[in-house]
Amino acid sequence: MLVTVTLLLCVLGGQALDLLKASSGVPPPVPRVHCWCSSFPNVTLCSWPEPSHCPPTHYVATYSERHGQPITEKCLIIPPSHNSSSPTSSSSSSSSSSSSSSQQWHCQLPNLKLLTDYIINITAVHSGGSSSYLSSFMLEDIVKPDPPVDVQVSSQNTRSLQVQWSPPPTWTNLHIFPLKYQIMYQWKNRGIASSVNLGPFESTQVELKGLSPGREYLFQVCAKELLDLGKCSNWSSSVNITLPRTKP
């Protein structure tokens, strides 16, 4: 006789709810899902890694309003083989887990409403059974822009630098939802690493003064929605520069 065991862990208040359904076979692992909005409010994605050493697995991804009408919508699922050519690949590469984006499944959640609780359900199914991940979220809580691009650093003199950058091109509503930025710069002094975080800045260029002549600095920039929705982006690609010891 087939024995079915259902384990439900439910944590309210926007935290994850994991539903694990196990049959007499060995079910797939519960998908490790991460959701974020890379261009508020239009581009929301969820991703999870392709499990290793599993039978062929397919996924069912749905979402619904927690307190609205009981209507379940299907997500558009993008398999790993299509990620490199997907228009969302730049977002997924910067915001997903440590696994390569080429090994990540994605789903798109279009037309989400503001100030609305949603529940997403990602179910993995194979011959051994099924496992589901459920999570509740509000769009405003998962905002996370992609990193700024085109970071450039130039020396003004022996003790000052100018740092400039461009907003992430995937943040398409910059005129309606502006971004603010933080700068992190790092250096070593006698082998000891130090770092400083500055900001937020609303402009896309900053002059930094009082630096040390002859010292090498590493700069990175992150972006966040101006009104503090969600999280700051991942740090941008780093730029290194060494200040001159003497005036040019």
Image: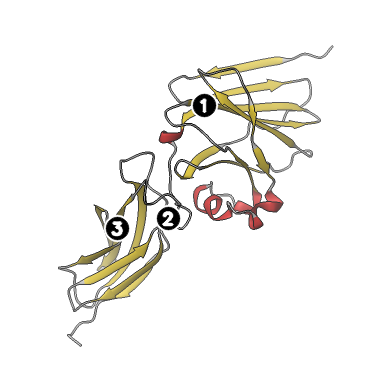
Instruction: Pinpoint residue 16: horizontal percent, then vertical percent.
Output: 51, 26
Residue 183 tag number: 3
The local secondary structure at tag 1 comes to: strand
According to the picture, the residue beneath numbered tag 2 turns out to be 147
According to the picture, the residue beneath numbered tag 1 turns out to be 118
The reply to whether callout 1 and callout 2 are in contact (CB within 8 Å) is no
Query: Can you name the residue that lies furthest to the front here?
Result: 175
For disc 1, the neighbor class at 10 Å (few under 14, some 14 to 19, many from 20) is some
Q: Earlier in the sequence, mark 1 or mark 3?
A: 1
Q: Nearer the viewer, mark 1 or mark 2?
A: 1
Give the distance between the C-alpha atoms of the residues marked 1 and 3, in whole angstroms.
33 Å
Give the distance between the C-alpha atoms of the residues marked 2 and 3, in whole angstroms.
12 Å
Give the distance between the C-alpha atoms of the residues marked 1 and 2, in whole angstroms.
26 Å
Tag 3: amino acid? Ile
For disc 3, the neighbor class at 10 Å (few under 14, some 14 to 19, many from 20) is some
The reply to whether callout 1 and callout 3 are in contact (CB within 8 Å) is no
Instruction: Pinpoint residue 199: horizontal percent, then vertical percent.
Output: 24, 53
Q: Earlier in the sequence, mark 2 or mark 3?
A: 2
Tag 2: amino acid? Pro
